[in-house]
Image (spheres, grey):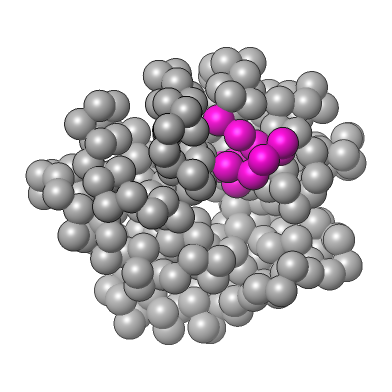
């Protein structure tokens, strides 16, 4: 069983997009059971509408698509209400924060009320990571330390440029027990094996980040990683099931 830990659904104002029927066809093509789906930043900047559309697409998918909420911390109390609605009405399984596209620093104090609300709702936070000035590993470490009660999942392996001091900084974030990383978007062939050997296979989960990244390519990187088969099972299904509470996902 394979579950994709992050796909962006809908048309983005930044030029990429993927619709529900296209995604389900891609999941079928590559033997993937289900995908966690987050809204894109739509051209109308209406995150409530985006959450509703993703929630409706998930509800119509027969369990193949599992929604996450996406909000903008600049919206303050409105963002909290939007998060509540996405969870209560559409069963959102997590909170997506994209500091670069919404133009905020992940360690800005205005983000903490959302983290506290996610903890109250029992959902993890996925952070689009590795964007200079917005979500670099040191900033993520500060954020994760401020909200130890909620799992924080970093996209792009915690840092696009996984070399030199950038790799060291990403490793510092992973020293925190509530920090996890996605497999997508890292160019080093040995990186997945390094994370498994140093931090454990329970700290890393498969995510394609499609359509920003290529779904088939990102899946093959995990399938071909030089790690034990039991580690691949954790990355491809068990970790995302545990973190997002997917025990009811159809098999």
Magenta residue span:
126-137
What residue do we see at 30% from left, 76% from top?
Answer: 30
Residue 150 seen in the figure: yes
What residue do we see at 80% from left, 56% from top?
Answer: 47
For residue 153, above or below residue 53: above
Q: Position of residue 107 (x, y in %)?
A: 71, 25
Q: Quadrant of residue 38?
A: bottom right
Q: Nearer the viewer, residue 212 or 189?
A: 189
Look at the image and say whether residue 132 sits in the magenta stretch: yes
Position of 70 with respect to 225 (left or right) is: right
What residue do we see at 27% from left, 52% from top?
Answer: 189
Specify the farthest residue to the front. 164
Quadrant in which the C terminus is drawn? bottom left
Q: Nearer the viewer, residue 3 or 169?
A: 169
Q: Main secondary structure of the magenta part?
A: loop
What residue do we see at 71% from left, 38% from top?
Answer: 134
Q: Position of residue 185 (x, y in %)?
A: 45, 55
Position of 131 with respect to 110 (left or right) is: left
Position of 165 with respect to 135 (left or right) is: left
Q: Nearer the viewer, residue 51 or 192?
A: 192
For residue 232, above or below residue 132: below
Q: Nearer the viewer, residue 53 or 8?
A: 8
């Amino acid at each position: 069983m394979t579950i994709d830990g992050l796909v962006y659904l809908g048309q983005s104002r930044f030029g990429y997009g993927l619709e529900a029927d296209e995604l389900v066809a891609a999941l079928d093509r590559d033997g993937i059971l289900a995908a966690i789906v987050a809204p894109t930043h739509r051209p109308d900047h209406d995150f409530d509408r985006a959450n509703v559309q993703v929630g409706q697409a998930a509800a119509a998918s027969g369990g193949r698509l599992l929604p996450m909420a996406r909000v903008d911390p600049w919206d303050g109390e409105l963002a909290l209400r939007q998060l509540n609605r996405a969870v209560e009405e559409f069963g959102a399984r997590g909170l997506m924060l994209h500091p670069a596209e919404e133009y905020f620093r992940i360690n800005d104090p205005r983000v903490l009320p959302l983290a506290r609300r996610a903890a109250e709702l029992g959902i993890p936070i996925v952070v689009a990571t590795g964007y200079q000035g917005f979500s670099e590993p040191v900033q993520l470490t500060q954020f994760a330390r401020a909200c130890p009660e909620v799992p924080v999942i970093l996209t792009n392996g915690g840092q696009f440029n996984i070399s030199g001091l950038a790799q060291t900084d990403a490793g510092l974030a992973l020293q925190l027990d509530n920090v996890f990383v996605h497999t997508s978007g890292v160019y080093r062939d040995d990186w997945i094996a390094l994370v498994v050997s140093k931090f454990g296979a329970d700290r890393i989960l498969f995510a394609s980040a499609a359509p920003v990244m290529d779904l088939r390519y990102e899946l093959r990187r995990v399938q071909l990683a030089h790690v034990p088969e039991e580690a691949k099972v954790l990355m491809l299904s068990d970790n995302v099931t545990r973190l997002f509470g997917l025990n009811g996902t159809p098999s």
